[in-house]
Structures are given as structure tokens and as C-alpha cells.
Image (spheres, rainbow, N blue to C red):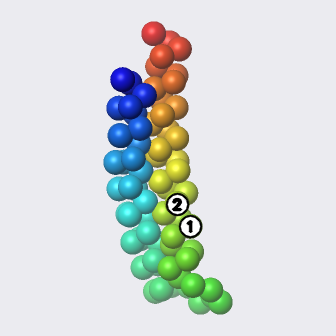
Amino acid sequence: MFLQLSVILGLAFGLLAGACAYVISYAEYKRNWSFHGSAAKMALRSALVAFTFFFVAAVGLVAILRMVM
């Protein structure tokens, strides 16, 4: 049960963090950077990193709490 809850919370917070990271990164790449690449691809990479971090953190926290309890 705790694993299912952590996956759901990880998905929810991961998607929220990913969306925020994408919007912020895309705006910054478009406004401030002069580079030879796609701002959307670079922002998508930032969003993927944020999503992965929050998802793994949510699942990892439950695993740590299970060992402690």
C-alpha cells in the first residue's frame, strides 16, 4: 500500500516539478541564451531531470521509512 501511494505521489509531484522546470527553462533559454540548439529540447531535458528526481525521491523515501520502522 505504501509503495502504491509513493508511486502516485511521485507521479503527481514529478509531473508538477517537470512542468515547472520546462516552463522556467524554456523561457530562460529563449530569452537569455544564444546557442545553437533547440530551446524546447533543452527545456525538456531539464523537465525530465526534475521529474526523475522527484519520482525517485518519493519512492526512496518510502523505502527508507520501511527500513526505519
State whether residue 29 appears in this view: no
Q: Which mark is residue 24?
A: none
- Quarter in which the C terminus is drawn: top left
Question: Residue 7 location, x and y as percent?
Answer: 41, 38
Q: CA distance from mark 1 to mark 2?
A: 5 Å
The residue under label 2 is which amino acid type?
Leu
Residue appearing at x 38%, y 55% in the figure = 15
Task: Please give left or right for residue 1 compared with residue 57 in the image.
Answer: left
Res 45 visible: yes
Amino acid type of the residue tagged 1 in the rendering: Arg
Q: Mark 1 near mark 2, Cβ–Cβ under 8 Å?
A: yes
Secondary structure of residue under mark 2: helix
User: Compared to 60, does 17 lie above or below?
Assistant: below
- Location of residue 22 in the rendering, given as x and y in whole percent from the top left corner: 44, 69
Q: Residue at x 52, y 22 (%)?
A: 64
Work out whether residue 24 or residue 42 is closer to the camera in this orientation and state it: 42
Q: Count residues near mark 2 (Cα–Cα under 10 Å), then give few for <14, some for 14-19, many for 20+.
A: some
Report x, y in % for residue 10: 41, 42
Give the position of the N terminus as an image quadrant.
top left
Q: Identify the residue at the far top of this view.
A: 69
- Residue located beneath label 1 in the image: 45
- Toward which corner of the image does residue 62 lie, by quadrant? top left
Q: Which residue is mark 2?
A: 48
Depicted 34 relative to depicted 4: above or below: below
The residue located at (48%, 34%) in the rendering is 59
Which secondary structure lies at badge 1? helix
